[in-house]
Image (cartoon, rainbow, N blue to C red):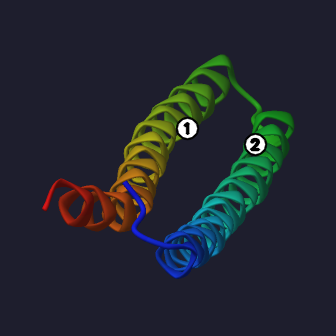
Amino acid sequence: MFQNFEDFQKISKDNAELALKNLNTVSKGLQTIAVEVADYQKKSFEQGTAAIEKLFASRSLDGVIQTQTDYLKSAYEGFVAQSKKIGELYADLAKETYKPFEAALAKAKQ
């Protein structure tokens, strides 16, 4: 399969570079996802705190129910939107991670 030692060294070097490049891509992608999750958690906590303050400030049962309903609706919508965004980030990460291997496999098939 390998005609000489130099070919083997070149392939080994190419594979090591591919692995390092891929590790860098994964690292950046996971960092982006972690930042998005942290931002969402902070925003969610702030919205929850504001809702609790509104609940305590409410003087009627109708006000409490309306505040709780508004909070739950916005929390649900925010969660769904954030879940979609995180899902897209993971899908993009998978695509970016696969790209170098795709090229290497195409090269190997030749």
- Pick whichever, 55 or 40, lies toward us: 40
Q: Secondary structure at mark 2?
A: helix
Structural crowding at the residue carrying mark 1, measured as other residues with C-alpha within 10 Å and reported as few (<14), some (14–19) or many (≥20)? some
Q: How many marks?
A: 2
Q: Residue at x 83, y 47 (%)?
A: 49
Q: Which residue is mark 2?
A: 48
Query: Quick check: marks 1 and 2 in contact, CB under 8 Å?
Result: yes
| Three-letter amino acid code of the residue under disc 2 | Gly
| Three-letter amino acid code of the residue under disc 1 | Ala
Q: Residue at x 41, y 37 (%)?
A: 80
- Pick whichever, 55 or 94, lies toward us: 94
- Pick whichever, 10 or 53, lies toward us: 10
- Pick whichever, 50 or 77, lies toward us: 77
The image shows residue 35 at horizontal and vertical percentages of 70, 66
Q: Quadrant of the N terminus?
A: bottom left
Residue positioned most to the front: 4
Q: In the rendered view, would you say 57 is above or below 94? A: above
The image shows residue 40 at horizontal and vertical percentages of 65, 55
Locate residue 98 relative to residue 108 in the image: left or right.
right
Q: Residue at x 82, y 38 (%)?
A: 52
Q: Which residue is mark 1?
A: 75
Locate residue 17 relative to residue 98 in the image: left or right.
right
